[in-house]
Image (cartoon, rainbow, N blue to C red):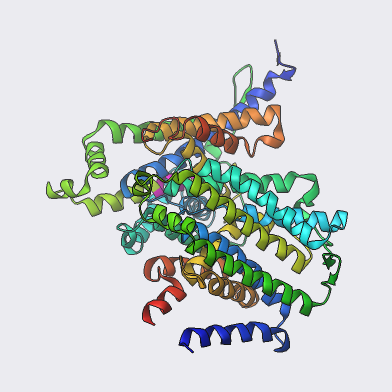
């Protein structure tokens, strides 16, 4: 039994693993989008740019500044998160009272600026950095070979996703956040500093996308534009999952990564577009998204 | 004569005189093509309140259809343009039909994703020339009678089409249909409660907009003689948003002014600024959204 429908199991498992890795990136990114959207009502188009910024920053930190890999994993998301918070404080907060469309347009402009700056500083040819020493090598699972780094990406993203979900759904802080989504004015009347909460949420969402960038840097070529194609897929993931729920963002992120990987086995040409097809299907059958509530 | 009539006459005279001023006509024709594209986009965003983030799909695909018919099958230009528009309208029906199932930002995300799908198809499809694009589109003769080889002749043909589209948009917006579109923009639930089938109105607006965006694309293919993947790209979709925003959303002339500015800006910036073009474009985007939401024409009309 080493074939299914005439396709070697090893190939299927290999693509499945790549799919889960991509799914981990989708999950981290759509999670950040969902958190930001829940709190600010803004679709953060700059998400892909912050992802590229995170990936570039970790390469610079590792190779030019010589900072330890594990320290980078903490530092880079924080630094990029702070950049995001400055953007929120100076520009984004001015459009909250306007139609949501303006938030999309504003963050799109920010994405152009960030990507443009990256391009004029680092060029557009792209670079990569090797997998850190501690994570080199493979696990031999008997039925397949699993590179340690990929196992690390999957496991770590999964833990981050679960932690975020737990924070938002099960803790006091999460309850405050959800209250702010529900009725910010009432919460402010209770003495909670809502604007600060909003800034921190935006920073956290941006930090998640920077973290995804850090994790992606060794497996995906780092270019200024690496995020702009990805963000389109992530938008589709969000439409499929429904923006309402944090869990929806995580589950549909991983799920669509897997679907994409399996499509690569069966019909490689379609793997780039299968997510969009599923999105169209979901729109026809269940317009609110798989986990969405509103009609 | 009122000030407005004089102003219109002056602008019209200036447009007619362009080929004799030494300005490169192809450059101005390109502006007309993008202006038509932006008119089409404005019909959706400005008058119906729908933000499409994937309008390049209609513009670019129609350009491919027209270009392919003319380059490979020597079809007469007008029929090729109409065929491109028909395909764009059909795409508008499918994409718009899916997109209007959601509202606001979701609609923007759905159009973005579906346009990406069209972009991938254009990359893979056999007739588009893939990465190389579609080249060698000869201008031919309009209806087999009027040869378009001369830039001057083509200029006036495109100017006439541009003015016709402008008039058509005005006609649409001022029609009862256009008034319903505005009502949907202002308050959709109320429009529904007044008995309008708003989904059908939105779909029709989408189809009209897609067809006109296709017209812009087809004309551009004829003017330049080639079509590339950048015509269907997301960058092109965002450019038309910028044109409309900069010129003035929901104004008649705004999109044309925005198109002229953005095309000119890009033309000169690419020489001097190189990779900073995106930074400048992004900064203009941000400035428009933060402090200049009326756009140039909107601000002008308010201060008149």
Who is closer to the viewer here, A243 or A217? A243
Name above or below for residue B63 compared with residue A27. below
Is residue A209 inside the magenta stretch? yes
Relative to residue A126, is residue B67 drawn left or right? right
Name above or below for residue B156 compared with residue B72. below
Is residue B195 inside the magenta stretch? no
Q: Quadrant of residue B256?
A: bottom right
Is residue A255 something that shows in the picture?
yes
Magenta segment's dominant SS is helix
Q: Position of residue A58 (x, y in %)?
A: 50, 51
Magenta part of the protein: which range? Answer: A206-212
Name above or below for residue A155 compared with residue B263. above
Who is closer to the viewer here, A202 or B83? B83
Q: Position of residue A112 (x, y in %)?
A: 51, 61
Q: Quadrant of residue B71?
A: bottom right
Relative to residue A188, is residue B134 drawn left or right? right
Who is closer to the viewer here, B169 or A92? B169
Q: Quadrant of the C terminus of chain B?
A: bottom left
Residue that appears at 87% across and 58% down? B74
Residue that appears at 54% across and 75% down? B257
Who is closer to the viewer here, B278 or B212? B212
Say how many tags the image has: 0
Relative to residue B223, is residue A87 drawn left or right? left
Of all residues, the one furthest to the top in this rendering is A1
Q: Position of residue A83 (x, y in %)?
A: 39, 58
Q: Position of residue B86 (x, y in %)?
A: 69, 51
């Amino acid at each position: 039994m080493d074939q299914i429908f005439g396709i070697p199991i090893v190939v299927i498992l290999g693509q499945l693993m790549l799919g889960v890795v991509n799914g981990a990136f989708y999950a981290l990114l759509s999670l950040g989008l969902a958190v930001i959207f829940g709190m600010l009502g803004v679709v953060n188009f700059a998400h892909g740019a912050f992802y590229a910024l995170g990936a570039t920053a970790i390469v610079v930190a590792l190779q030019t500044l010589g900072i330890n890999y594990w320290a980078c994993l903490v530092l880079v998301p924080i630094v990029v998160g702070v950049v995001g918070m400055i953007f929120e404080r100076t520009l984004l907060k001015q459009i909250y009272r306007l139609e949501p469309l303006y938030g999309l347009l504003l963050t799109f402009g920010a994405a152009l600026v960030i990507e443009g700056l990256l391009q004029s500083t680092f060029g557009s040819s792209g670079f990569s950095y090797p997998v850190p020493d501690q994570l080199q090598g493979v696990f031999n699972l008997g039925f397949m070979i699993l590179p340690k780094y990929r196992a690390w990406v999957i496991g770590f993203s999964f833990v981050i996703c679960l932690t975020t979900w737990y924070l938002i759904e099960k803790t006091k802080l999460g309850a405050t956040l959800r209250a702010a989504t529900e009725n910010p004015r009432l919460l402010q009347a209770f003495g909670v500093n809502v604007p600060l909460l909003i800034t921190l949420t935006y920073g956290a969402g941006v930090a998640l996308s920077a973290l995804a960038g850090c994790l992606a840097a060794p497996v995906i070529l780092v270019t200024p534009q690496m995020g702009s194609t990805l963000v389109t897929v992530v938008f589709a993931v969000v439409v499929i999952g429904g923006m309402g729920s944090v869990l929806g963002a995580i589950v549909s992120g991983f799920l669509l990564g897997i679907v994409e990987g399996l499509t690569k086995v069966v019909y490689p040409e379609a793997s780039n577009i299968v997510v969009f097809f599923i999105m169209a299907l979901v729109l026809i059958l269940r317009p609110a998204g798989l986990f969405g509530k509103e009609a | 004569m009122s000030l407005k009539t004089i102003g219109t006459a002056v602008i019209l005279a200036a447009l007619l005189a362009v080929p004799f001023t030494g300005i490169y006509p192809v450059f101005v024709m390109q502006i007309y093509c993008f202006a038509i594209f932006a008119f089409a986009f404005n019909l959706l965003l400005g008058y119906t309140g729908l933000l499409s983030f994937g309008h390049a799909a209609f513009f670019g695909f129609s350009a491919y259809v027209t270009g392919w018919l003319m380059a490979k099958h020597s079809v007469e230009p007008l029929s090729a343009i109409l065929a491109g528009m028909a395909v764009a309208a059909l795409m508008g029906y499918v994409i718009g039909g899916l997109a209007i199932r959601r509202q606001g930002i979701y609609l923007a995300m759905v159009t973005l994703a579906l346009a990406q799908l069209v972009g991938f198809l254009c990359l893979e499809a056999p007739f588009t020339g893939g990465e190389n694009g579609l080249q060698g589109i000869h201008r031919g003769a309009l209806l087999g009678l009027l040869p378009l080889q001369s830039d001057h002749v083509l200029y006036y043909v495109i100017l006439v089409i541009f003015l016709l589209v402008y008039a058509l948009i005005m006609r649409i917006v001022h029609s009862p249909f256009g008034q319903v579109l505005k009502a949907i923009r202002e308050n959709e639930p109320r429009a529904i409660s007044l008995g309008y089938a708003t989904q059908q109105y939105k779909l029709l607006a989408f189809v009209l907009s897609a067809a006109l965006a296709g017209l812009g694309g087809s004309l551009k293919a004829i003017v330049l003689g080639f079509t590339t993947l950048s015509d269907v790209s997301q960058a092109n979709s965002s450019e038309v948003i910028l044109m409309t925003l900069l010129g003035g959303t929901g104004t008649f002339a705004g999109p044309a002014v925005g198109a002229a500015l953005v095309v000119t800006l890009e033309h000169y910036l690419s020489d001097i600024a190189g990779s900073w073009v995106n930074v400048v474009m992004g900064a203009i985007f941000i400035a428009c959204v933060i402090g200049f939401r009326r756009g140039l024409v909107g601000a002008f009309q308010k201060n008149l």
